[in-house]
Amino acid sequence: MDNTSFIKSIFDPYFEAPAEVWHSFAAEMSEREFRKNQLIKQSGQKEDFLNIIAEGSAGIFMQQKLQTICLDLCYERDVCCDYMSFLTRQKTPLYVQALEPVKLLSISHTVLQHIYDNSLTGNQIGRSAAEALFVHKQNQQIELLTLTAEERYYRLMEKQPQIILRTPSKHIASYLGITPESISRIRKNTTG
């Protein structure tokens, strides 16, 4: 699948536009690749890119004392960046790290602002991206507040069945707001 079709397929549920619009948008994106464990965005830095994962996976993390906290896990077709920093143009303590070799389609903040300023459709694309990210984070928050650890684990496995093979348990546990021991216990109950 070419980049235009790929991007169109991601945004169609939020904003349908003709292929020519997505072709223009895709033409402004650059392909970037990172090795497993390589930092895509460092803590204490400003996020300059809105990224869509074409291949691989990444996580959004922060350090709290000696503990790594996973705020999000991102896979193919996900937008993956420190979106708060991208919007506010402020440095944050969040960092984005490749969890496996990753290929990103990235658009810089400067280029995206130019598209917004010069195109009504560009504004609609930006709005649809923001809405998609908001819905994702709101669902994540609702699940964290209303589901048990075990229910959150099963819901994640339902949505992302390959996650166990692709993501370290410590990151899955942190993302779900539970301990690695709880993950082990849930898995044991599932298989046992």
Image (cartoon, rainbow, N blue to C red):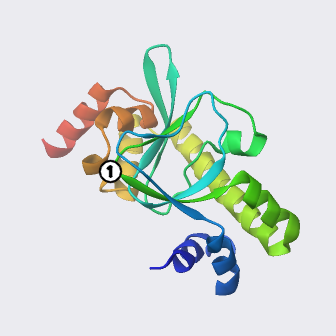
Residue at point 72%, 52% (across, down):
109
Location of residue 79 by image quarter: bottom right
Circle 1: residue type:
Ile
Residue at point 63%, 47% (across, down):
138
| 94 in relation to 140, above or below | above
Total numbered labels placed on residues in the image: 1
| 74 in relation to 124, above or below | above
Q: Where is residue 35 in the image (x, y as percent from the top left)?
A: 37, 47
Residue found at the very far left of the displayed protein? 192
Left or right of residue 120: residue 76? left
Q: Nearer the viewer, residue 1 or 159?
A: 1
Residue at point 25%, 49% (across, down):
165
Q: Where is residue 181 in the image (x, y as percent from the top left)?
A: 27, 26
| 187 in relation to 66, above or below | below
Location of residue 149 by image quarter: top left
Q: Where is residue 56 in the image (x, y as percent from the top left)?
A: 38, 56
Residue found at the very far top of the displayed protein? 65
Q: Residues within 10 Å of mark 1 (few under 14, many from 20)?
A: some
Residue at point 27%, 47% (across, down):
164
Q: Position of residue 153 (x, y in %)?
A: 36, 43
Q: Which quarter of the image is occupied by the N terminus?
A: bottom left
Q: Which quarter of the image is occupied by the C terminus?
A: top left
Residue located beneath label 1 in the image = 163
Left or right of residue 121: residue 65? left
Q: What element carries label 1?
A: helix
Residue 123 seen by the camera: yes
